[in-house]
Amino acid sequence: MSFDFDATVVGAGAVGLACGRALSKRGLTVLVLEKEGHIGQGVSSRNSEVIHGGLYYPTGSLKAKFCVEGRRALYAFLESRKIDHWKCGKLVVATEGAEVERIETIFEQATANGVEGLAHLTGAQARALEPELNAHAAILSPESGLFDSHGYMLALQGEIEDAGGSVVVSAPFEGATPLSGGGFSIRVGGEGAMTVSSRLLITAPGLSSQTVAASIDGYPEVDIPERHLGKGIYFRLVGKAPFDRLIYPPPIPGALGTHYRKDLGGQAVFGPDLAYVETEDYSVDPKKADEFARYIRRFWPGLPDGALTPDYAGIRPKLHGPGEPQPDFQLHGREHHGVDGLMALFGIESPGLTSSLAIGEAVAERLSETS
């Protein structure tokens, strides 16, 4: 049976585009569908643009594996394509003695995950690197950094198109029907509404993952995990950035917590926090500046009064609610849902951006094995 495309990817964020690139590299014709008018308008555009080292995730988990593999591949990709990035390093800081045991646990976890170059620092050593820092002790992760996520996604799009694939925006996925001989009939909405056939189908639409899976005929409802929306807001500093390195306090339940970065434009940004919400609301409440300031002064006592201004918000596609354990990335193939040629991704939040190249390769590899 002939198909319009070998593979169709739903979602043109970092992970969807990385999946499309990995499939294109294997000689497949690829279609990437994006409901928004531009690529990377969802989760991929509302984050810290941090390249994570791989410190925090349970050893053997997909998050640990893909973060370390993805980070190594990402630096090489960014360097070879001259995409703006900065391996600035990260300090995970214990601001008081009671937090030392927590950061030591992170060090042990990171070492088990194969993270390179880690170092224990005393408070004095940390302050020698960042004089305005309040630190009782710290861990240095030299492999952590920042990058231009939009430049990265444009490069992924370019590679898909150079290989003969198509990335189509303003083209919402409206559903798919598995065909009796294999493959899928896929309904695409928008002004150019159409139906296309594809041998493989990959869903990576971030916050819409559950809705998209439910619109595939025959997809078992029991295999669709419950969606939780984890909102995080950011504040920007008015004034000179106080640190060059990323500054992270110990993580909070369910997230890495409010941290500091000096962005590629040289400005200081703090965030995100974590609040569970019911709707996709991207507003930033200016009144939260005082709460942020109290938290920031734990590691930067010199924060001037009134120096924080509201910046932006992001929403993470979480699979756990408040107080629940944080699950791993979910890559659901035939063994989960029983549908040949389909890979459905759920819960691709942090470190999904760092992990994207590794996720793409894993998806392409698994579909190659089963097809």
Image: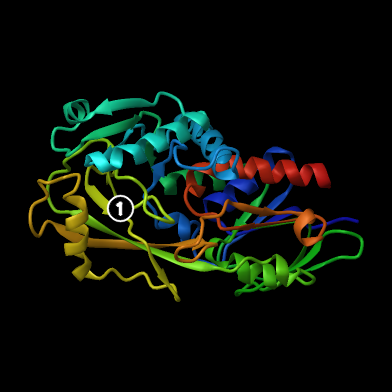
Along the line of sight, which residue is nearer the eye, 1 or 249? Answer: 249
Colour scheme of the picture: rainbow
Instruction: Tell me which residue sits at (30%, 53%) in the image.
Output: 258
Give the percent coordinates (x, y) of residue 212.
64, 68
The residue type indicated by label 1 comes to: Thr
Graded by Cα atoms within 10 Å as few (under 14), some (14 to 19) or many (20 or more), the crowding at tag 1 reads many
Give the image quarter of residue 50: top left
Question: Compared with residue 82, is residue 282 higher up or lower down, i.e. above or below?
Answer: below
Q: Is residue 163 visible?
A: no
Give the percent coordinates (x, y) of residue 169.
56, 63
Q: Is residue 291 visible?
A: yes
Give the percent coordinates (x, y) of residue 298.
19, 48
Number of numbered markers: 1
Q: Does residue 370 appear left or right of residue 118 in this picture?
A: right
Residue under label 1, please give it: 258
Q: Does residue 283 appear left or right of residue 22 in this picture?
A: left
Q: Does residue 59 appear left or right of residue 241 in this picture?
A: right
Instruction: Tell me which residue sits at (73%, 41%) in the image.
Output: 365
